[in-house]
Amino acid sequence: MSFQNPVFIPGPTNMPEAIRKACDMPTIDHRSPLFGKILHPARANVQKILKSDTAAVFIFPSTGTGGWETALTNTLSRGDTVLAARNGMFSHRWIDMCQRHGLNVQIVETPWGQGIPTDRYAAALAADKDHKIKAVLATHNETATGVKSDIAAVRRAMDAANHPALLFVDGVSSIASMDFQFDAWGVDVAVTGSQKGFMLPAGLAILGFSQRAVAATTTAQLPRTFFDINDMTKGYANNAYPYTPAVGLMNGLLLATETLLAEGLENVFARHSRIASGVRAAVDAWGLHLCAATPDLYSDTVSAIRTPEGFNATSIVTHAADKYGVAFGVGLGEVAGKVFRIGHLGSMTDVMALSGIATAEMCMVDLGLNIKLGSGVAAAQEYYRGSVAQRLEDAA
Ligand SMILES: *Cc1c(COP(=O)(O)O)cnc(C)c1O
């Protein structure tokens, strides 16, 4: 492996030097006004990134998976029904977590490569006259398949049925990279982590709770201690946590959020969209197809690329690591061996993306796929030449 090359896995992502350094700080008293000067502005910045005026922001020493558990245990009780689409490995794992907590999951089985079928959500909600469904789960960006779902449409389906369920959104691989509108979409709990769009090491679960979701803690019976948001609220009032916070990571989060807001959220989203479009131009030039079935589903943070029948897509990932010291993502679950993934989120530029495309191309040629060296790179170059590059540093 190489420490010089960027990584092209969809998290953990590349870390800008300044953000990495911000995580490295002397010990301070983690129950002090000094910690408050990190904690409170970091939470306020996360609220802005969620596009919310009111969300209560909670940050746990954990990962996205702990964020899922925070959403469930603070709002639900054993035996409650939740509605969830299974269209990839991450939605699958969240469903599995629900089942292990004794929730009754009404699963909408969905082909991998498709988005959340909002018509089927609408039908399930309309049929639920007794309002047994307490929460609707939505994975905004299925990192396993590179599929983006339409959260506004999920909210419209809920509103059309006049359904009072809470809306929980997994935005682990979308928030801070792709547009996410907590307030406008009526999200009740948004879940993310530090190691994707926030360009930090893994180690923080980052959540927004609506007032309705906070209120649900009074009736929710699922056991919770570490992830209890009410304990956390009490801690925050004293510039502290109910336990020891990851102070260095919090300091990194403060700088990461400042950096993103200085670039401008819309510029961040445009950068991701532009970089992703270049990657897709390369895939097209290779004569390959994305796992995502239609263009409206294409993710701007990760591309899962199908390889020809009979070819083991994982061999590209192994070969890239062994020969070129570059990391790509393997296919997971149902698409294991059928796709490889190029992560293009976080601290990423057009030029970095070109190096990833070039490496993927070398690997595919090495492994005997019928691909012309330089074809994907040229297609991406054409795309990037034609669009004005704006880099993270311009704004910072
Ligand atoms: C990465 C990811 C997760 C899991 O997050 P961890 O930080 O690995 O626990 C959950 N959902 C999605 C969509 C992800 O991309």
Image (cartoon, rainbow, N blue to C red):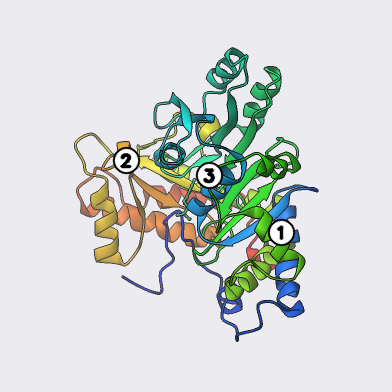
Q: Residue furthest bottom?
A: 26
Q: Is residue 161 above or below residue 236?
A: above
Residue 49 in percent (x, y) is at 70, 53
> Decide: marks 1, 3 in contact (CB < 8 A)?
no
Element marked by disc 1:
helix
Left or right of residue 370, residue 390 in this image:
right
Residue 141 in percent (x, y) is at 52, 41
Name which residue type carries label 3: Ser
Ligand 1 contact, mark 2 (Cβ < 8 Å): no
Q: Is residue 131 above or below residue 355?
A: above
Looking at the image, tell me whether mark 3 or mark 2 is earlier in sequence order. 3
Q: Residue furthest right?
A: 53
Which quadrant: the C terminus? bottom right
Q: Is residue 396 visible?
A: no
Q: Residue at x 55, y 31 (%)?
A: 296
Report how far apart the C-alphas of labels 3 and 2 lie in the structure: 26 Å
Label placed on residue 233: 1
Q: Residue at x 62, y 14 (%)?
A: 129
Residue 187 in percent (x, y) is at 68, 38
Name which residue type carries label 2: Gly
Please name the residue that numbered disc 3 is placed on. 277
> Decide: marks 3, 2 in contact (CB < 8 A)?
no
